[in-house]
Amino acid sequence: MATRGFTRKTSPADYADRIPPGQSRTEGFPVLSAGPTPRVSLGDWSFTLKIGPRPMMRWTWEEFTALPQTKMTRDIHCVTKWSKLNTPWRGVLIDDILAEAGLALPPDYTLAHSFDGYSTNVPTADLIGGKAMVATHYEGKPLTPEHGGPARLLVPHLYFWKSAKWINALQFLERDEAGFWELRGYHIYGDPWREQRYRGD
Ligand SMILES: Nc1nc2c(c(=O)[nH]1)N[C@H]1C(S)=C(S)[C@@H](COP(=O)(O)O)O[C@H]1N2
Ligand SMILES: [Mo]
């Protein structure tokens, strides 16, 4: 449909509708970590699925990287107000992790845990249906330690603090439990399109 006075052009207008309220586009890739970068060797790496306190499945690096690989290019949004468009990732969909574990109906809530002691909560529904992955590659290369390598959670439709770097476990829970930043005043859900930055937003 032709609309008088408007032409298609490559300008900020083309991506403006992909930048949530209060965010600005960055071309760089800032590093944000609450503490020092843990150095996890692939030999020491493992990933565990838990239901409540009970571990139900554990993968070594070799086993984990033999799971089906998926590529996903997404926009990401940090609560510190930068957004980065078209970030290209590769890894294992949470759907494929659950299928491998034979877990058809996991409990409604999930806490992601990391090697640095970090944690963050996400409703299980936000992790499945192709929406999230455990990413091992960025721009075709192994994920660097600063950005969460060997592996990080990627939940691109929520603020980036939900994308736990250095992930080592997903724990399914019957009730929502706040993670590291959520306990310190960040929003329990964190939808960038609704500007859910802090508790009460
Ligand atoms: N394990 C762990 N994951 C983490 C963090 C952290 O401190 N530890 N910081 C979070 C925050 S606040 C953001 S914005 C993103 C930053 O990811 P980046 O450093 O790759 O940009 O990682 C998130 N995941
Ligand atoms: Mo962040």
Image: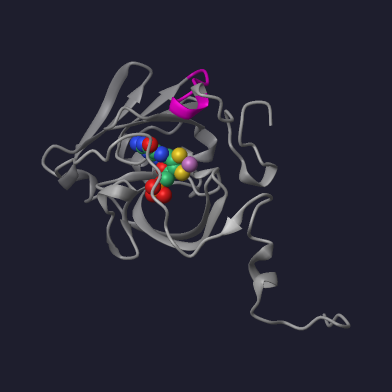
**The quarter of the displayed image where residue 110 is located:** top left
Q: Is residue 59 above or below residue 146?
A: above
Q: Was residue 128 drawn as part of the magenta stretch in this picture?
A: no
Q: Nearer the viewer, residue 194 or 27?
A: 27
Identify the main secondary structure in magenta: loop
* Quarter of the image with the N terminus in it: bottom right
Q: Is residue 171 above or below residue 9?
A: above
Residue at 48% from the left image edge and 29% from the top image edge: 181
* Quarter of the image with the C terminus in it: top right
> Could you tell me residue 133's position as x and y percent?
40, 47
The residue range painted magenta reads 174-182
Residue at 84% from the left image edge and 83% from the top image edge: 2
Q: Is residue 187 above or below residue 177?
A: below
> Could you tell me residue 22's position as x and y percent?
67, 49
Q: Is residue 149 left or right of residue 173?
A: left
Q: Is residue 150 above or below residue 1?
A: above
Residue at 45% from the left image edge and 46% from the top image edge: 132
User: How many marks on residues?
Assistant: 0
Q: Quadrant of ligand 1?
A: top left
Going by the picture, which residue comes out furthest to the right?
4
> Could you tell me residue 14's position as x and y percent?
66, 72
Q: Taking the image as drawn, is residue 164 in sight?
A: no
Q: Is residue 25 left or right of residue 172?
A: right
Residue at 30% from the left image edge and 48% from the top image edge: 146
Q: Nearer the viewer, residue 90 or 39?
A: 39
> Could you tell me residue 103's position as x and y percent?
38, 32
Q: Was residue 181 drawn as part of the magenta stretch in this picture?
A: yes
Q: Taking the image as drawn, is residue 54 in sight?
A: yes
